[in-house]
Image (cartoon, rainbow, N blue to C red):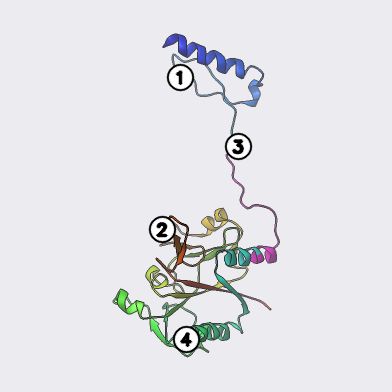
Amino acid sequence: MSSSRDLILGRVRRALADVPRADTPPVSEQPGRDSAYERAVDRRYLREHGSRSVSETVDLLAENLADYRAIVHRATEEELPYVVMRLLAARGSRYVLVPPGLPPQWMSAADPTRVHDRAESTPGELDEVESVVTGCAIAVAETGTIVLDGGPAQGRRRITLIPDHHICVVRVPGQVVASVPQALERLDPTRPLTWISGPSATSDIELDRVEGVHGPRTLEVVLVGGA
């Protein structure tokens, strides 16, 4: 064992012979062991990939959402109630689930019966609802991801998993970040976080894509900003 160990350490020393000592921090010395040196590894991660303006970041979010087969719409604050009305009418939704803190003006132009998120609602009752309208906590441009944290305008996790159609409103640029590290800095890890990248989908061994397996079959994202 000793001769093998010496052989290996000798090869390591020869391989590191041309490395300046100042270039590598020493490994903590332990009693009975030779001093050795290893190259320092830069473990800093990029906070975002590339440099983009605010509008370019929002455009990247829209592009990646669409790449995940989410349907993306843009609207102003004034247009939002009519966009929601149009999307619900196009689905023929008779009942729409709304979280307790959803801003009333978002649904001010819509006709379907509103079903409020209640603790006593059973999965069967929620399954009778065709659509759900929520806000979000944050949206990640580089990954096309919507994050929900159970806030007042989002409700409990189950209301966004059972209905077949989810309309999610994202305020831009305030709720848009470029990268996952930036999102994590703004999220509370103690809250029930749901990360959504496109509609719910899975593939079998033959890669046949099936949507709506463990969540909404259709995800529509409305980016709401200025003019």
Cβ–Cβ under 8 Å for marks 4 and 1: no
Amino acid carrying mark 1 in the image: Gln
Q: CA distance from mark 2 to mark 3?
A: 30 Å
Q: CA distance from mark 3 to mark 1?
A: 24 Å
Please tell me which of labels 2 and 3 falls first in the chain: 3
Please tell me in which quadrant of the rendered image residue 40 appears: top right
Amino acid carrying mark 4 in the image: Gly
Residue 192 as seen in the image, left or right of residue 68: left
Q: Which mark is residue 92?
A: 4
Q: In the image, residue 137 lies at what x, y percent?
A: 50, 66
Q: Which mark is residue 190?
A: 2
Which of discs 4 and 1 lies nearer the camera? The answer is 4
Q: CA distance from mark 1 to mark 2?
A: 40 Å
Query: Principal SS element in the magenta part?
Result: loop
* Residue carrying label 3: 42
Amino acid carrying mark 3 in the image: Asp
Q: CA distance from mark 4 to mark 1?
A: 72 Å
